Image (cartoon, rainbow, N blue to C red):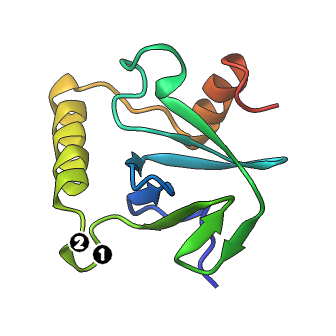
């Protein structure tokens, strides 16, 4: 069984309205999951760090609430989101700063009140 929280590949979450977000960090939450989007530190308000409620099910793809999580670009099905992820990775390389560690991302989510 693939553990969603230990994967290092980019993930995609798809909501019932067919909206999709790239996930660049994913954490357990007592009532679901919390994830970071690309450019999370530049998005307005609470858009950069998302909380999804529901029971996490599956081994890949996964389901949480009414949303489905898959590996990004699996079989070339998500070119727009794959391009967004590639642009974000390039942005990080150009910035030349160290990206926060997993523990640091959890701390950021706690500070913003998204994780308990």
Q: Quadrant of the C terminus?
A: top right
Q: Secondary structure at mark 1?
A: helix
Q: Position of residue 30 (x, y in %)?
A: 84, 47
Up the image or down, 52 lies above or below 43; here it is below
The answer to whether residue 34 is left or right of residue 93 is right
Tell me the distance, in whole angstroms, between the alpha carbons under discs 2 and 1: 6 Å
Q: Residues within 10 Å of mark 1 (few under 14, many from 20)?
A: few
Q: Secondary structure at mark 2?
A: loop
Q: Which residue is mark 1?
A: 74
Quarter occupied by residue 11 = bottom left
Furthest residue toward top? 45
User: Which residue is painted at 65% across and 48% down in the image?
Assistant: 27
Quarter occupied by residue 91 = top left
Task: Tell me the mark number nearer the camera, choosing from 2 and 1.
Answer: 2
Contact (CB < 8 A) between labels 2 and 1? Answer: yes
Up the image or down, 5 lies above or below 70; here it is above
User: Which residue is painted at 57% across and 36% down in the image?
Assistant: 50
The disc placed on residue 18 is none
Up the image or down, 84 lies above or below 80; here it is above
Furthest residue toward bottom? 1
The answer to whether residue 104 is left or right of residue 77 is right
Q: Which residue is mark 2?
A: 77
Q: Position of residue 78 (x, y in %)?
A: 24, 63
Q: Quadrant of the N terminus?
A: bottom right
The answer to whether residue 87 is left or right of residue 109 is left
User: Which residue is painted at 27% across and 68% down in the image?
Assistant: 73
Q: Nearer the viewer, residue 18 or 70?
A: 18
């Amino acid at each position: 069984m693939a553990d969603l929280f230990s994967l290092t590949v980019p993930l995609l979450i798809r909501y019932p309205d067919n909206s999709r977000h790239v996930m660049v960090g994913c954490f357990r939450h007592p009532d679901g999951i919390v994830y970071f989007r690309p450019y999370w530190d530049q998005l307005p308000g609470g858009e950069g760090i998302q909380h999804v409620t529901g029971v996490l099910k599956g081994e890949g793809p996964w389901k949480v609430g009414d949303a489905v999580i898959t590996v990004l670009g699996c079989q070339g099905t998500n070119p727009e989101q794959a391009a967004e992820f590639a642009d974000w990775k390039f942005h990080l390389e150009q910035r030349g700063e160290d990206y926060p560690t997993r523990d640091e991302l959890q701390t950021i989510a706690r500070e913003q009140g998204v994780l308990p």
